[in-house]
Amino acid sequence: MSELSSLSDYRLRISPRCKRVLIRINPLGEIEVVIPQGFDPHEVPAILQQRRRWLETHLEKLRARWAQAPHEHALRPSLIQLRALDSRWRVSYTPWSSRQMRLKEQADSLHLHYPQAREADADRLNSRRLQKWLNEQARKHLLPWLAQTAEELDLPYSSACIRAQKTRWGSCSAKRVINLNRNLLFLPAELVRYLFVHELSHTRHMNHSAAFWRQVEKAEPDYRRLDAALGRAAGYLPRWIHV
Ligand SMILES: [Zn+2]
């Protein structure tokens, strides 16, 4: 396939801790190769050729997902859908002469102004500003929702905060501090509620024992289906949050 002229386009990293060559596709659709120290980087293109089928399959899946909702997955998205809140935002971008970024919220739309002088870097600047907005939305909506769920289930915690985590949707520490991933906003509400039930149940059981799952089941009888769906939920995340 012609698309895989991009096979020659990859990010290379040398890691002293790494024992063998690692190849992955990051959420932006870039190929990343990690090689052990002393490994000859000239061998990398041949290895990528060997893994060509695997790389093609994964890149195609990713591109098909983006193609289903091009406005949401664009690096400069014109639509943001926060499924957890059942809200949709139109987004517009205007270059201006100021050196500042500005985001204006108006009914159900967001207007971004970015420095004209930095057009080449504009996708990154805009997406960083949108990510900051996302953090604010998460604090504003997820924290009160968690508090309400805790009260409803009678499972108190000591404090909660919002994080921009890469691999976890949430966590609960031994001190009953709950971390929530701001990207939960992109997920359907039932998955967010399940994550709350899961972390709140850890305030009673700091493990995944049978007693823990009984506690979860009391609050959410459909937990098996929701737990499996949460495992696949990265598919809801738009591309621009990784910029
Ligand atoms: Zn857990």
Image: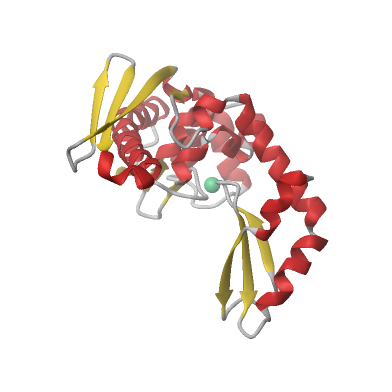
Residue appearing at x 50%, y 28% in the figure: 72
Asked if residue 110 lies left or right of residue 205, the reply is: left
Q: Nearer the viewer, residue 146 or 205?
A: 146
Residue farthest bottom in this picture: 38
Return the x and y of residue 213 as percentages of the image width and height.
Answer: 60, 40
Residue at (19% x, 37% y) in the render: 97
* Depicted 139 relative to depicted 27: above or below: above
Q: Can you name the residue that lies furthest to the top here?
A: 107
Position of the N terminus, as image quadrant, is top right
Residue 163 visible, this orientation? no
Res 129 visible: yes
Q: In this rendered view, identify the residue nearer to me: 92 or 236.
A: 92
Counting from the top left corner in percent of width and height, residue 173 is at 40, 53
Q: Position of residue 101 (x, y in %)?
A: 23, 38
**Against 124, is 12 above or below?**
below
180 w.r.t. 44: above or below: above
Answer left or right for 8 relative to 52.
left
Tell me what residue is drawn at x 31 percent, y 23 percent: 110
Q: Residue at x 40, y 46 (%)?
A: 164
Color style of the picture: secondary structure
Asked which quadrant contains residue 223, the reply is top right
Count of marks, rendered view: 0
Which is more toward the observer, 33 or 202?
33
Q: Is residue 94 left or right of residue 61?
A: left
x, y percentage for residue 167?
A: 52, 50
The answer to which of 184 and 192 lies nearer the viewer is 184
